[in-house]
Amino acid sequence: MELVNTISNNKIIKILALALIGSILLTISAKIKIPFYPVPMTMQTFVVLFLGISFGYKVGVLSVIFYLIEGIVGLPVFSNSPEKGIGIVYFVGPTMGYLVGFIFACLLAGIFTYNKNHILNLLKITIATSVIYILGILWLGNLIGWDKPILEFGVYPFLYAELFKILLLTTLVNKVVRFRKYI
């Protein structure tokens, strides 16, 4: 019985450690800005999907939740923080829908199965990414009003960058998904 408890405890520690590493990767991806047109690109959405694909949906989603909690309690983990605020005030701002969308995108990316069919893999990764933007637009519209050009603020500036990240992840997905067997 003691051996079973030790194995369970070791598994929990491993999952928590991986989730913490995932949240750190997500923080780093939020802070590095790559010059891109028309707005600088971070690799956040890439890492969100990467976590789901490589760690599986349970550890991936836990990583994203850790990241969000870290930001909500005031750690400057979010993109543009601390410059544009920290904590719950930043979280409930214009980007909240996108941040919440990270959870569901990671969940989808982790649930999907991937194979050698690059077209299907591309479609699955695109669907998972789209969840981020759908929730982001819904929140942004409620926050600033639907009479504003929501797509011009919340989607169009990011399309080229997202396409780049989706294509990059599609080329890597079959290598990345192999990490799951070690968790």
Image (cartoon, rainbow, N blue to C red):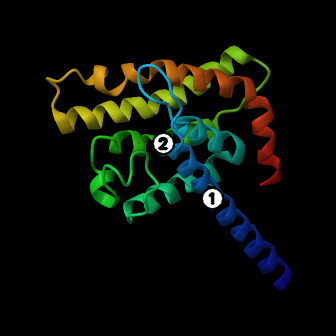
Give the percent coordinates (x, y) of residue 59. Answer: 64, 54
Residue drawn at x 80%, y 21% as measured from the top left: 116
How many marks the image carries: the answer is 2
Q: Secondary structure at mark 2?
A: helix
User: Which of the 4 image quadrants contains residue 152?
Assistant: top left
Which quadrant does the C terminus fall into?
bottom right
Residue 172 versus residue 127: which sits nearer the camera? Answer: 172
User: For mark 2, what is the residue?
Assistant: 102
Residue drawn at x 46%, y 19% as measured from the top left: 37
Q: Which mark is residue 169?
A: none
Give the percent coordinates (x, y) of residue 139. Answer: 28, 38
Disc 1 marks a residue whose amino acid type is Ala
Give the percent coordinates (x, y) of residue 90. Answer: 31, 52
Residue 69 versus residue 135: which sits nearer the camera? Answer: 69
Asked whether the viewer can see residue 1, the reply is: no
Furthest-right residue in view? 3
Location of residue 14 with respect to 166 vertically, above or below? below
Residue drawn at x 64%, y 45% as measured from the top left: 51
Give the percent coordinates (x, y) of residue 81. Answer: 39, 51
Furthest-bottom residue in view? 2
First in sequence: mark 2 vs mark 1: 1
Location of residue 21 with respect to 102 vertically, above or below? below
Distance Cα–Cα, label 2 vs label 1: 14 Å
User: For mark 1, what is the residue?
Assistant: 19
Which quadrant does the N terminus fall into?
bottom right
Furthest-top residue in view? 119
